[in-house]
Image (tube, rainbow, N blue to C red):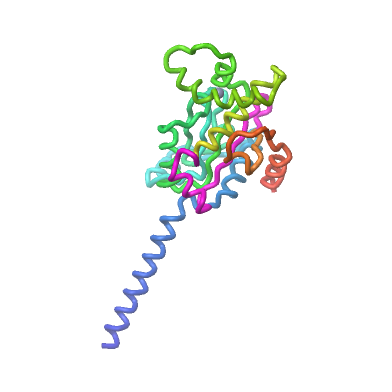
Amino acid sequence: MFRMKKALATVGIIAILFAYSGMAFASEGAGISPDDALAKLVSGNVRFVEGKQMQKDIGNNRRTELTKGQHPFAVILSCSDSRVPPEHIFDAGLGDIFVVRVAGNVADSIELGSVEYAVEHLGSPLILVLGHQMCGAVKATVAGGKPEGNIGSIVKKIAPAVKKAQTTVKDKDKLLDAAILENTKNTAATLTQKSAIIKHLVKEKKVKITAGVYNMATGKVELIEAGTAGKAASSHEPAHEHAHAEHSQAGH
Ligand SMILES: [Zn+2]
């Protein structure tokens, strides 16, 4: 009788342990916080800028390991521009980042669905919307006119950002950069405006949204001031000081 009780108790403890580890696994995802994920991206970008890329395992061992599943620590929604490849910019390896690339880094239902998949099913804690200098899609929108084929769908998505930039920036030379910034912020805002899944995860503090603009010449990603990234377009400039602080913090 005593033995039976002991055996049952043991089974009970094992069941609880299994339930607990199951729960921990389900909510763990990439296993790091949104802030730590951002610090990882920032330090990866510092290595890229300095030309000190990490030795990464992109061979057999890592590939085999990844056949068991993926837990990317960040989602990057960026432009398709050949000069802006997120894996290089953030010095990331196989299975590290979940990348959604589309001309002009816009977010329509297909892009939103891709981001939803990563944050909900893969447990990625961070979404970074990445714009970049000299973006051809934004440039075409600034130029105006009627684009051919399906390019019009992209231009239509970028148009509100250009309109917003035109109301605040009178200097024509600065208009493209301002429109790129607005467009990046608009996409970040769209993530919670058009996706109940992302909005819910952000509210639960399981996911953070941030945004940045890639500098073509230096390779540096300038983070847009926290607090404006996830909100509707405003006239804030990128928070250079904030980005510097993140960089030095991540450098330790
Ligand atoms: Zn672009």
- Whether 203 is among the magenta residues is yes
Q: Position of residue 229 (x, y in %)?
A: 60, 39
| 153 relative position to 7: left or right | right
Report the residue at 38% width, 43% height from top: 67
Q: Identify which residue, 249 or 144, lies in the foreground.
A: 144
- Whether 215 is among the magenta residues is yes
Q: Which residues are magenta?
A: 192-220
Q: Position of residue 161 (x, y in %)?
A: 58, 27
Report the residue at 38% width, 60% height from top: 22
Report the residue at 55% width, 35% height from top: 129
Screen quadrant of the N terminus:
bottom left
Vertical comparison of 9 with 170: above or below = below
Q: Identify which residue, 135 or 181, lies in the foreground.
A: 181
Report the residue at 48% width, 49% height from top: 201
Picture quarter with ligand 1: top right
| 101 relative position to 233: left or right | left
Vertical comparison of 200 with 46: above or below = below
Residue that protrudes farthest toward the right in the picture: 241
Q: Position of residue 106 (x, y in %)?
A: 50, 29
Q: Position of residue 183 (x, y in %)?
A: 57, 29
